[in-house]
Amino acid sequence: MVSTYTDLDTKAVNTIRTLAVDTTCKSKSGHPGAPMGMAPAAHVLFSRIMNFNPQKPRWINRDRFVLSNGHACVLQYALCHLLGYNLTIDDLKNFRQLGSKTPGHPENHNPDLCIEVCTGPLGQGITNAVGLAIAQAHTAATYNKPGYDLINNRTFCFLGDGCLQEGVSSEASSLAGHLKLGNLVAVWDNNKITIDGSTDVSFDEDVEKRYEAYGWQVLRVADGDSDYASIEQALLDAVACKDKPTLINMKTTIGYGSMKQGTHSVHGSPLSAEDAAHVKREFGFNPEQSFYVAPEVYDLYKKHVARGVEAQQKFDELFAKYKTEYPELAAQFERVVEKKLPEGWEKKLPTYKPTDPAIASRKLSEIVLDSIAPVLPELVGGSADLTGSNLTRWKGAVDFQPKESNLGDYSGRYIRYGVREHAMGGIMNGMAAYGTVIPFGGTFLNFVSYAAGAVRLAALGQFRTIYVATHDSIGLGEDGPTHQPIETYAHFRAMPNINCWRPADGNETSAAYHSAISLAQTPSILALTRQNLPQLNGSSIEKALKGGYVLVENKDANVTLIGTGSEVSLCVEAAKVLEAEHGLKARIVSMPCCEIFDEQAQEYRLSVLPDGIPIMSVEVYSTVGWKRYAHEAFGIDSFGDSAPYQQLYAKYEMTPEGVAVRAKMTVDAWKPVQNIRSPIHHAF
Amino acid sequence: MVSTYTDLDTKAVNTIRTLAVDTTCKSKSGHPGAPMGMAPAAHVLFSRIMNFNPQKPRWINRDRFVLSNGHACVLQYALCHLLGYNLTIDDLKNFRQLGSKTPGHPENHNPDLCIEVCTGPLGQGITNAVGLAIAQAHTAATYNKPGYDLINNRTFCFLGDGCLQEGVSSEASSLAGHLKLGNLVAVWDNNKITIDGSTDVSFDEDVEKRYEAYGWQVLRVADGDSDYASIEQALLDAVACKDKPTLINMKTTIGYGSMKQGTHSVHGSPLSAEDAAHVKREFGFNPEQSFYVAPEVYDLYKKHVARGVEAQQKFDELFAKYKTEYPELAAQFERVVEKKLPEGWEKKLPTYKPTDPAIASRKLSEIVLDSIAPVLPELVGGSADLTGSNLTRWKGAVDFQPKESNLGDYSGRYIRYGVREHAMGGIMNGMAAYGTVIPFGGTFLNFVSYAAGAVRLAALGQFRTIYVATHDSIGLGEDGPTHQPIETYAHFRAMPNINCWRPADGNETSAAYHSAISLAQTPSILALTRQNLPQLNGSSIEKALKGGYVLVENKDANVTLIGTGSEVSLCVEAAKVLEAEHGLKARIVSMPCCEIFDEQAQEYRLSVLPDGIPIMSVEVYSTVGWKRYAHEAFGIDSFGDSAPYQQLYAKYEMTPEGVAVRAKMTVDAWKPVQNIRSPIHHAF
């Protein structure tokens, strides 16, 4: 039954609107239009539907809210304030200022607030919401028991026309329909306006029909500006639909109340002072007053928030009982929520001796997954339709699928993302944000670039997501240059807060997983080969966990060779040729992860890459970035070719002879330089 | 009226199928399944519908074909051979071998063939096809005259389930529907199989309904395996529909004829010898014979190809008449097809004196567009819904829109891509591939990364596409870290065959356009500021066209400072502080485009970055990559913040003082090193 609404609700809605106006006027930048248009939907959702406790903002069973049109963030900030989260009027006044709690787009760095993910880059938020809903469904299926409906939260998402145009949202919405995520409700701010003006100029598709085609329930609210009861009814109908996600087509007026309402003029710039006063007069507010919140508005929200507080307290009581009845499951639940790993899990990581056979690192990765998946129930992942190539499916894995499909069930941990790399990335971010799972996803390394927008937000949002990125170089062979990464790792190595692993053998592959799983606030990419790699003499998990280490020491060396991944064993062979053919000696450094090497003490780093002799890097990628570590860089600065991989390695002279001759040229070129300075030194 | 089909057609279809089997068996790698399934559709399309002349493969009015599921390329190669393009049976036998005409995925590097674009990365081909159709519609609207239906070709695209799952295809298809591209026909290879098995595991949306929602005509062929007449009827109906693009749902059997037909086993691996023999027996072919083409099959195609040859000859006749009636337009047409620029166009590029006012480079870009758009009718572009921010719309521009929309018409040159960056990139590739336009597209630099998959194929496919990438750094200010590029240029600088411009002032902005427009086989990104930049003393178009040059020479310099974009004027200010505060002198190098600098003679490069004194780079991006040019790199290796940009520059010490103090530290650190070696030297 729909609640009754009074003038006080309208006052609350208009308070959100005037706060949006005042906040953006004060900051002289920002987006007032969408917050003014979506204030009614936000008011109804947060006051009548959602369960949360601002005093325990990270309560695990809270309803999640994602503002996919993140530029509308003053809406979220105003709500945070009104609902009693730790965000003051002064914080609103500090909107978009250095170090404030209220940056220009929502960031999830402040655990006091109800901001789950970083949004702003369009299409990401709704994709994250799909991930949050997947994680919720999985967590509920894993932990709920008869009489213990422990995990039952919903995920709500606001999104605009821009989000609907982005391909990543199409991918995610298609998958959400397939997965029948009844716990997901998306509210489309259908205001017919984008930055370029009317949506008529580029976006006149039938969105409702498209979402029905995806298998969603589609509802409509004709007057999202003031018909609170219809808004609530739609939200109730959405929540009641358990076997489909719901899209609510909410017709709103951008900048509602402004002299320029309904136009793109109110989208991305503050209102004029005159217009701001106009808005307040329209709403019966004092045009002379800014940042005004009537006491009764605070009271209204306080009253409604009580529902969530009570729900949270009931959850605690229920969980206390659950602990006695299901102590092991309860302990596991508490452990994963606290992001602790099970004692000794890392002992399951396989280790290798040099006499063990050569194995492709994608296969080594599969062996790791087979070994750790049973002891890490929080590990949930799959592939973007490359399961047989990525080797991501561990023995005994069950698909995460709706039960009706007979393909698995929601307690399953293997995700069929489909051919949707970008959505896979954004969904992983949402899953990680939920707080109970460690998500991973497989594709070819080259196609991690399709997901670049989401990878960036994993790094910025500090989400532990893991990309199992196989077919990591020209070593994939015949598929050719469309599939062979060249620039990919220069890109991700330049991205802050993401670890780019390229293991050289079995021990290093285990180290890569060790690191990726242990670091709770950093995403990782694991670049893995299609072709076999020998087990190195001198590698170990412990050494590889330093990011770079001396694989072969030689006190009389004339040159240091750095290799990564498949090129480390190449360097080992090249060193033999260098000595036999050119009478020169080499030290060999394996550098499976530059970012982690960078974090080591300078003394250690200098012991690996010391002064005095020249350093040459060897990697079948673009050389861009290597001069941070090496005086000379041997790589591939063109696109690859289609051919058996051995022929490609030969073509690019990535052979023992090719490396050796360049090592000699390096030694010769640096002969005139006395006291060669290691690139590890930095002036500042 | 539909043609009649005989057993000879079936023999031709089965010849395509057996060639697909033999080609992949010979190469021991590749994808036989889709070619076998799509052979009937391809046969009907190429023999009965499409117009082309294999002897004049680049005829501008040829019907275009794009194989979006590029892994099925043996289909295209077999057709090239059978249709009489310059591709022999030996070329088929060389499939996926080094240097062959038949790489693992289609590449457009061979002008002898009917391969328009590089495909393989899923979703790109259909997006390119939308671009080809846009360019066709625009070219027809620009050049056709009463009695001269000069340009009337169609674009046909085959795509698989994978392409339909990729977000980029959703974006492009939505825009194609909006634009009412009646010249576009997409054929969906609906075989219900992807690499992971049945599409049921992740893709069970209602594709027909989705495409109807986009505004497409949707047709269906129930038996795409053998019902040639229905295939032809659907294609005829598609071609007849002039105000909508068409999707044909073609139900096929993957690997038709194989013992494993209809399963994912035939998707990505050659058939066994036993199965190959089985296929041939099924089709009445000799199982002992490989790469067999019956003479009558060649004859069949020869007969049908005559239609296209005739059409091409009629086009030539028509154009000869057109030349006399519309000599200017004809001359322009010939010029753009030959990719020649109009004489003296570059004189329209504005130049600036140091006394001219400071202007944001996005605004400088707008001034360039205002100036050159009138003299370069082939320049066609727009923005991904950021027109007012990217400043991409020149004075007097008309929208490329369907006439019925009353928003413009097809002769319009301004494209409203919508919030669809990835599709914008892929569409630009298709437009460039068409051969009559120079496409550009605007978005924020940070969101060029959304289009990374398409940018890569612009570089690989050698397409002149131009990204007008504004808001190029923390200098965008309040929008914050979700919008501030850090890693973006490390990524694209590591990508082969793409020029990354970051102009520092008006003259350099003009140079960036000069280069981007002049280089017919290289895409360019122009990173442009939101904030104002002063006009430099010492810049010029000519100097900037060398990629890097000495802005301020100083024979007594202690250090060389390299800046790009907004940091060049910062270096100029820093040099004053360095001298005043630290008693040190600096040379200043402006480096607007590293890639073009790399192409200069070593002697020139050493004159810009000479031996003897240390070099320090200054750029508000990741430092990754700068040690190719500098001994020390000053940058930002973390994500940015939300604040007014001046505060951000101060926070990261990107101030005259901050740069000066680091320059001093650089000088101090390198004091002990004698004969400092410029990073421009390379040992090999």
Image (cartoon, coloured by chain):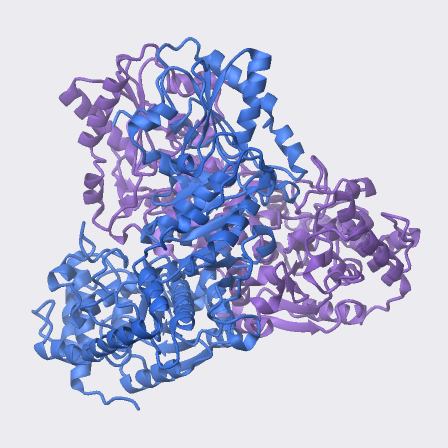
Chain colours: A blue, B purple
Front residue (pair A613, B45)? A613
Q: In the image, A42: left or right of B261?
A: left
Residue A60 % position (x, y):
29, 68
| Residue at 30% over, 61% down | A71
Asked if A11 appears above or below B229 in the picture, the reply is below
Q: Position of residue B202 (x, y in %)?
A: 55, 66
Q: Position of residue B457 (x, y in %)?
A: 55, 45
> In which quadrant of the rendered view does residue B559 lie?
top left
Give above or below for A347 relative to B598.
below
Q: Nearer the viewer, residue A201 or B420?
A: B420
Q: Is residue A413 left or right of residue B23?
A: left
Mark count? 0
The image shows residue A415, relative to residue A489, as above or below, that is below
Instruction: Give the side of residue A176 with respect to residue A149, left or right.
Output: right
Is residue B339 shown to the viewer in this render? no
Pick the quarter of the image with the N terminus of chain A: bottom left
Residue at position x 18%, y 20% from top?
B579
Q: For residue A93, what is the image quadrant?
A: bottom left
As drawn, B455 above or below A185: above
Q: Specify whether B261 is left or right of B182.
A: right
Q: Which is more toward the observer, B496 or A570? A: A570
* Quadrant where the C terminus of chain A is found in the figure: top left
Q: Residue A177's spot in the image, x, y percent?
A: 49, 72
Q: B401 or B445: which is nearer to us? A: B445
* Residue at image coords 27%, 46%: B640
* Residue B528 visible to an observer of this rendering: yes
